[in-house]
Structures are given as C-alpha cells and as structure tokens.
Image: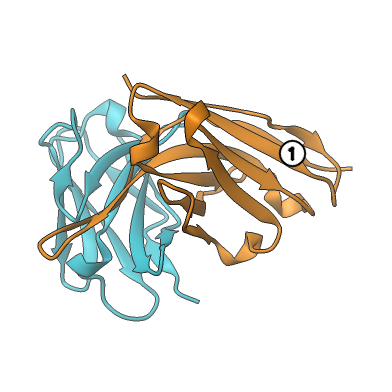
Amino acid sequence: QTVVTQEPSFSVSPGGTVTLTCGLSSGSVSTSYYPSWYQQTPGQAPRTLIYSTNTRSSGVPDRFSGSILGNKAALTIMGAQADDESDYYCVLYMGSGISVFGGGTKLTVL
Amino acid sequence: EVQLVESGGGLVQPGGSLRLSCAASGFTFSSYWMSWVRQAPGKGLEWVANIKQDGSEKYYVDSVKGRFTISRDNAKNSLYLQMNSLRAEDTAVYYCARYKRYSSSSEALYYFDYWGQGTLVTVSS
C-alpha cells in the first residue's frame, strides 16, 4: 500500500521561508502524480493552494509556490505570516481514479 | 459563487446506515466530477470516493468499498454518499468537494478545487 509522507510538524519565524515536502514510501514523486496542496485551519474546510505541481489556485498569494525537489513534491512559503499557521496537506494522483492524501504537516509560525 | 452544502450527518450505531447529501450551486454541476473526503477527529484528510459527471465511473478508497456508494442527481444538483455497515472508524467530518479531472494529449488536471463546510458522522453505540 502506497503511503504519502509529509513532515508531521514544522516551524518558521515570521517573515521567514519554509519548504514542506511530500514524498512516497516507495519511489519518487514526479509531475506525473499531479501533486496538489491544501491549507486547513482548525474547524475549517480545506482551501486549495496549488495544483498540478506548481499552479496557484485563484486568489492564492505568490508567497506560496509548488515544485518538485529531488524525489518529492514541495510547497514553499516565503515571508511567512501569522495566519499561515495551519495544517498543510498534499495529494497525489495515483491513477485509476485514486487520490491519496499525505498525513499533513502542522506549521507553526513563531 | 460556488457553494457546496453537506447535510445528513449524525449519530448512528455500528452496523447502521446513513445517507449524506451535498447541494451544489453557482456552477454547472453536471459538468464536473465530484468527490467525498473525510477527516476523523484530530486526524488528517482522507479521500473517500469520486464520481464522473454522468455517474458512469465511480472510485472508492479500499476501506469503504462494498459499504459506501457515491451517486449524483444532476437534475437536482446534488451529490450523495450512501453509507452502510458503518464502523466506529468511519466517524469523521465528511466534506463534499468539486473535483477537477481532465486529461488530454497535452495536459491533465487532478485536484479538488472547491470544498463544502462538512457534516459530522459519529458511529457509536
């Protein structure tokens, strides 16, 4: 069974830059997995940030960017702000209609 | 404005059934794949099921196959999730999401672009 891996937690200073990653328990992530990223604050519905590796969803500031770094998908947040403190989830498309979420990364801004 | 509003959640005993609904508005419902995604209390998001625009293709996560059925009524702009043989581990907030799925020789899209606010399903005796 394929597991999508994310760092459980990360912290960044206000104004700093942080890169969250999304990997596979076996194999490498490529653009062919069409990685997407979602932000969720407690008690709220997810918000779509990035799709198809590096395309920002409508209204998402350009402080958020997506890429492939080595064998993982990556979400980089520049100029971190207090309201960036959230859970971040990646999703990989596995083919045959199946999508798999990573376990999520809890980002703390302090 | 795209809106997705879930309903039908509640408390059900193990082995019981529940039917979730999602009312869609603000877009041409029949033109989009739709999905259900769930989140157990204090846990991460989990994709549950997808359905094609005309209902001809449906996909499920292994843990719900044979127990859950996704369906849609395009005339009513509504998405459904029939949940049978419910287990404690099905306890979660269930989100309805619009799923952008497209592929051609030059590009492809696979992602969730709009989300409802969710409905809570609790399976407990």
Q: Assess disc 1: are there few (<14), some (14-19) or many (≥20) residues with their C-alpha within 10 Å of its C-alpha.
A: many
> Between residues A64 and A100, which one lies in front from this camera angle?
A100
- Circle 1 residue: B122
Residue A56 visible:
yes
B98 on left or right of B51: left
**In what element is the residue under mark 1?**
strand
Q: Residue at x 35, y 21 (%)?
A: B26
Q: Residue at x 64, y 59 (%)?
A: B64
Q: Residue furthest front?
A: B75
Relative image position of residue A38 (x, y in whole percent): 33, 43
Considering only vertical position in the picture, is A68 above or below B19? below
Q: Quadrant of residue A63?
A: top left
Relative image position of residue A10 (x, y in whole percent): 33, 49
Q: Residue furthest right?
A: B125
Relative image position of residue A30 (x, y in whole percent): 20, 70
> Between residues B105 and A45, which one lies in front from this camera angle?
B105
Residue B117 visible:
no
- Find chain B in the image and tell me its colour: orange
> Between residues A30 and B23, which one lies in front from this camera angle?
B23
Considering only vertical position in the picture, is B23 above or below B14? above
B108 on left or right of B8: left
Q: Residue at x 36, y 69 (%)?
A: A95
Considering the image in quadrants, where does the C terminus of chain A appear?
top left
Q: Amino acid at mark 1?
A: Thr
Considering only vertical position in the picture, is B125 above or below A2? above
Q: Quadrant of residue A28?
A: bottom left
> Between residues B11 and A15, which one lies in front from this camera angle?
B11
Q: Which colour style is shown? A: by chain
- Find chain A in the image and tell me its colour: cyan
Considering only vertical position in the picture, is B88 above or below B120? below
Q: Residue at x 24, y 60 (%)?
A: A34
Q: Residue furthest top?
A: B1
